[in-house]
Amino acid sequence: MRQAEVTTLKILRNYLVKSGGSVRARRFTTQDTALCEQLDETILGFRSARRAVAEGGKRGWLRAIRRATGIPVNVLAKRLGVTKYEIFRLEKSERTSRIVLANLNRAAEALGCELVYALVPQVGSLAELADEETATRKAARPWCTRKSKRR
């Protein structure tokens, strides 16, 4: 793993707080702004890649990489120790979002690639997503915004 990925993972791990045997997210603070900015920079490359594949007809990463590198189905099948039919099934399972990550990782290695997994906001940045979440929570709990009556 590269240093930047390790740092990102540490930041994400620290963002989660262990409480009573379950993991819950802590409240979003101004300190998390740096986290959002760092993750947004990291995610930028994934957004570009997603657009490139989407424009190609959503055939899936496995097929796109296999075809771009010129690796025939039978060669990939031999590397994975499976039949050609299994390669087509694997590509189909990726397209239909039913692929197992372990299988995707094995296929990536057979293609000479590294599997990188990311969650990318559908619209906007993580900071905007966090602001929307905060606004939604405040709207759902109006009693939290009232000032206490102190004398």
Image (tube, rainbow, N blue to C red):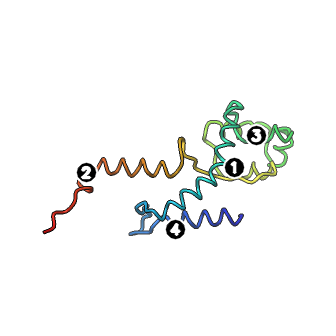
Mark 4 surroundings within 10 Å by alpha-carbon count, few (fewer than 14), some (14 through 19), many (20 or more): few
Please tell me which of labels 1 and 3 falls first in the chain.
3
Label 2 and label 1: CA atoms lie apart by 47 Å
Residue at 37% x, 49% y is 135
The residue that disc 1 covers is 103
Query: The residue tagged with tag 3: helix, strand or loop?
Result: helix
> Quadrant location of residue 10?
bottom right
Please tell me which of labels 2 and 1 falls first in the chain.
1
Label 2 and label 3: CA atoms lie apart by 54 Å
Query: Which amino acid lies under the numbered mark 1 shown in the image of this protein?
Result: Asn
Query: The residue tagged with tag 4: helix, strand or loop?
Result: helix
The number of discs equals 4
Please tell me which of labels 1 and 4 falls first in the chain.
4
Residue at 66% x, 47% y is 46
Q: Residue furthest left?
A: 151
92, 57: nearer the viewer: 57
Query: The residue tagged with tag 1: helix, strand or loop?
Result: helix
The residue that disc 3 covers is 87
Nearest to the eye among marks 2 and 1: give it. Answer: 2
- 80 with respect to 37 (left or right): right
Residue 142 - label: 2
The residue that disc 4 covers is 14
Residue at 42% x, 63% y is 26
